[in-house]
């Protein structure tokens, strides 16, 4: 059976994924069917990043910051309002439906809720093999063999293929979801908060599984999470989101030990020391005050100025660009440490 593998499009040294100026807004309508538009939710506002083969980029931030919408727009589950998403050099927004379906063989998703993301009416084997059937990969025997292979790869038994999702624990269901994502041998896996619905004792097992699969199969991850202690273990690079903007990005060790943006400093200050993330720098009280503004009515200037202890007049008037921090001015490309702050450290 011929399974989808590497695509020469874009060249070996080109980024696997390039996102530039990505925008996604949602209309807010009144209470009746004929009500007009009352506003727009500014979920993603000009996000740009790249992702190299074999790399893990963690997209982090509080709930409601836009990271899940960003990930789903990258996967074309939502069509962007502006900006481009290039995968292996192809602009996904310009592809026909037929070509986009073919490209999606190389992009898999693992959703946050292992209870809601699996069809309760299908046995596990049918759930895992379904992508093969949809994309016309192999005959029945070949699909069966591949299904058993990935079920065993995620730590389950071949006999589990005959059981139904309700017969498994939350951690086991997430293993099933990961097996479904792996079955087409994707180049990119978008993992949307894959640990947050699980008990703490199970989270480490799934995290170790994801890391082992990455190392064994050369996978590339766009990893969505709010937990910086988890990021400390799995990420190569980090992009921090706030109100639909990327406010800081850089290599994991650089960003976690030398955070520049006040919002990143606040996130790090909130990580419980006994629970992990002991390398994360905490330099005094850096917590963010107040509530997150509504994404329907974004503040003028810097989106974080309403909660920032450093805010001055310029912060209320001008949204700062994402630029190199003083300590990394000489770095370039993926090694650059960037922050969108008028008073970055």
Image: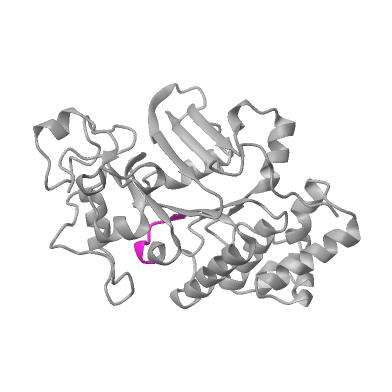
Q: Residue 98 appears at what percent x and percent y?
A: 74, 32
Image quadrant of residue 110?
Answer: bottom right
Q: Is residue 66 above or below residue 193?
A: above
Residue 24 versus residue 96: which sits nearer the camera?
A: 96
Residue 296 placement: quadrant: top left
Residue 215 left/right relative to 333: right
Q: Please name the colour scheme applied to the rendered image.
A: one colour
- Number of numbered discs on residues: 0
**Residue farthest left in this picture:** 312
Q: Residue at x 24, y 57 (%)?
A: 258
Q: Nearer the viewer, residue 307 or 238?
A: 238
Against 117, residue 249 (above or below) is above
- Magenta-span inclusion, residue 226: yes
- Residue 264 lies, with reference to residue 84, above or below; the image says below
Magenta stretch in the rendered image: 223-229
Counting from the top left corner in percent of width and height, residue 166 is at: 66, 70
Give the image location of residue 245, x and y in percent.
Answer: 34, 39
Residue at 30% from the left image edge and 55% from the top image edge: 255
Residue found 72% across the figure and 50% down from its top: 5
User: Magenta includes 328?
Assistant: no
């Amino acid at each position: 059976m011929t399974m989808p593998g590497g695509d020469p499009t874009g060249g070996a040294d080109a980024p696997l994924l390039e996102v530039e100026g990505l925008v996604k807004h949602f209309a807010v309508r009144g209470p009746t069917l004929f009500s007009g538009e009352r506003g727009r939710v500014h979920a993603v506002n000009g996000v740009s990043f790249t992702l190299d083969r074999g790399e893990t980029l963690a997209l982090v931030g509080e709930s409601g910051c836009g990271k899940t919408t960003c990930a789903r727009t990258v996967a074309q589950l939502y069509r962007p309002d502006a900006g481009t998403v290039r995968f292996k050099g192809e602009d996904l927004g310009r592809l026909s439906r037929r070509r986009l379906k073919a490209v999606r063989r190389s992009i898999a998703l693992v959703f946050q809720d292992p209870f809601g993301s699996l069809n309760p009416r299908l046995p596990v084997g049918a759930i895992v093999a379904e992508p093969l059937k949809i994309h016309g990969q192999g005959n029945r025997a070949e699909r069966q063999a591949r299904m058993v292979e990935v079920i065993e790869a995620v730590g389950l038994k071949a006999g589990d293929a005959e059981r139904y999702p309700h017969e498994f624990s939350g951690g086991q269901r997430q293993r099933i979801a990961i097996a479904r994502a792996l079955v087409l041998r994707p180049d990119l896996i978008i993992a949307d908060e894959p640990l947050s619905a699980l008990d703490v004792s199970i989270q480490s097992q799934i995290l170790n599984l994801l890391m082992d699969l990455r190392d064994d199969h050369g996978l590339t991850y766009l990893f969505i999470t709010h937990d910086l202690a988890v990021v400390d273990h799995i990420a190569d690079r980090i992009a921090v989101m706030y109100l639909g903007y990327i406010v800081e990005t850089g290599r994991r060790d650089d960003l976690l030990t030398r955070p520049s943006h006040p919002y990143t400093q606040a996130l790090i200050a909130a990580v419980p020391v006994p629970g992990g993330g002991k390398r994360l720098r905490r330099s005094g009280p850096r917590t963010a005050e107040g509530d997150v503004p509504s994404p329907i009515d974004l503040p003028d200037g810097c989106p974080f100025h309403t909660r920032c202890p450093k805010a001055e007049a310029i912060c209320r008037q001008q949204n700062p660009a994402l630029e190199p921090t003083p300590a990394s001015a000489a770095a370039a490309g993926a090694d650059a440490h960037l922050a969108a702050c008028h008073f970055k450290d």
